[in-house]
Structures are given as C-alpha cells and as structure tokens.
Image (cartoon, rainbow, N blue to C red):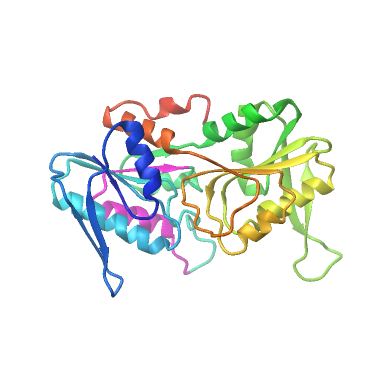
Amino acid sequence: MLFTGRAHPALAEEVAQLLGVELTPTRTVTYANSEIYCRFEESVRGSDAFVIQSHAAPVNEWLMEQLIMVDALKRASAERITVVSPFYPYARQDKKHLGREPISARLVADLYRAAGADRIMSVDLHAAQIQGFFDGPVDHLWALPVLSDYITQNYDTSRMTVVSPDAGRVRLADLWSDRLNAPLAIIHKRRDPNVANQVAVHEVVGDVEGRVCILVDDMIDTAGTICQAAEALKARGADKVLAASTHPVLSGPAVERLNGSALEEIIVTNTLPMLNPVPVNKLTVLSIAPLIAKAIHEVFEDGSVTSLFAGVS
C-alpha cells in the first residue's frame, strides 16, 4: 500500500501510476494551532506500507506529518513500514563541527525508528554515513543513471569535463567521470592572501579550456557555490558550463542567482517540488519516479535494490 504526505503529492501519484496501484485515501488536517491530524480511510492491517514524503520547506512540518503517518500505520497493524524520503531531512547536519552541536541527521533516523519505521529509502544522501544512523535497512538510491543518461543523449561527452564545485563533492564527481568516461576537474576555493577579509579565489585544477564542463552536486540550495564555480570555469576558458544536481532546494536568492549565471543548462530531478513562483531559466527537471517505483517493487518482492545500480558505487 502506498501513502503520501502533502508536501509533493504529484511525485507520489506518478510512483503509484508506474506501480499500477492506488494511493491509499488519507484524511490529513492541520488544526488552527498548527497541530497535524491523520487518519487512513482504508484498513492497513498486514500491509507492506510505503510512506512517501518530500521534505521541502517547511521541512519541520512535513517531517512531523510523515512521523504521524508512520505512527498511525504502526498502531493500525501494518506488517512493514518503509519511509520513502527522496530528500532526507537535516542530511547536512551529519556530524559535529564544533562542541555543543547536534547531529540532527541521526536524530531524524531515531525519530523514524521510534515512530515505527522498519526501513528507509532515500535518494542521494548528502553523506553516506547517514545509512549507519538508522537501526534497520536503508535503501540508498542514486540519481546518477537518470541524470547521466540525459547528458549522454543531449551532449557530446567526448568534449566534456566533469567538475567538482568544491573538495567535498570529489567522490561524486569521480563517479560521474567514470560513468561518462570524461576527465575530472576540481575547483578549490581559498582566501586571497593579497586581499583582506574573506575574499575567495577559485583555483581550477584540471583541463577545462575549450571544454563542455558539467558541474555535479547532490543539491542546489542558495546556488552560491554552483554559480561562482560556473564563473570560474568560464574565466578559465570553458566553452559551455552545465550543472547537474539531484535535489533542487532553491532557497532564498537561488533563482535570481541561477537566472543571472553563466550556466548553459541546469539539470535536476523532481525529488522536491518547485515552489518558487519565479521560473528558473534553462532548467530541465527529470522525473525520479521511475527509479523510486522500481526500488519499491524490489523491496516489496524481496528482490535486489542494488541490482538497479550496476556500475554505480
């Protein structure tokens, strides 16, 4: 049985259609004091339940809604409950940088477990270690095949260089490099010793002159990093600069920055809904629903989710 929260019902509807099942009718209400109420309008006893919820803003509201849905399923005797969270909430708070800080990604995993979840399914976790935060199976899905297939169908990869926008995404860029059989470049940000106060310069390590460069990242949030990286690549003689990212968070000034950037095309998936009223120019949105539907089918049939990602590791 499939269930959806209210954050991104269009994605859940597409997944349901691909699986050939109906979303379970659910009554969800937000009361005047902001408390959430949920009731399923069909029996869920003995079911293999998949609760789909994307975590766009307001993240806390949609997280709480999903937890309440999981708790309702547990109390209604669902046999197995899988949380399907295409964009894992609080994923960037996966470790302590300073004293007296939380590890919020671990807290979210604990909350899912306490609510009654038996399994978690997510797409492109910000840090692989999050898989170890949950005491149960975690299906880590990769959007790389979806994004890279689009690139190979629309661009000449023999002229392409894969670029990591910062040191933290080198591992991801390396996977892209193997997938496209393209060379790898890295953008290193550092402070300019000749200029006082926080002025960063971007050093490009790798061959980008005259090349089609594709910047890869797991998410675009405020778009500052990706737009600065695109400018640095153009300044080093790149012919074209593309961006490919799984999660279009697009907070704050992101849309304005992307529309004014040197990027030729911005390719994302629909793990999150597009909430900004101003459209992003040159934006291509690919559906992640077929990948999620296949993974749900494999879990339901006790098959292999790993087999969906042959050649990606």
Per the rendered image, the range of residues in magenta is 100-123
The image shows residue 64 at horizontal and vertical percentages of: 32, 61
Q: Give x and y (percent) for residue 11.
A: 40, 44
**Residue drawn where x is 26% and y is 44% of the image:** 118
Residue 184 inside the magenta-drawn segment:
no
Picture quadrant where residue 217 is located:
top right
| Image location of residue 9, percent across then percent down | 36, 49
Q: Is residue 200 left or right of residue 81?
A: right
Q: Nearer the viewer, residue 267 or 246?
A: 267
Please state if 154 lies on the left or on the right of 95 as rendered.
Answer: right
Q: Position of residue 255 (x, y in %)?
A: 62, 58
Q: Is residue 203 visible?
A: no
Q: Is 105 one of the magenta-colored residues?
A: yes
Work out whether residue 64 can be spotted: yes
Give the vertical position of 198 relative to 135 (above or below).
below
Tell me which residue sits at (61%, 28%) in the image: 179
Please state, as top left, top right, bottom left or bottom right, where the N terminus lies in the image.
Answer: top left
Q: Residue furthest bottom?
A: 33
Residue positioned 59% across, 39% down in the render: 172
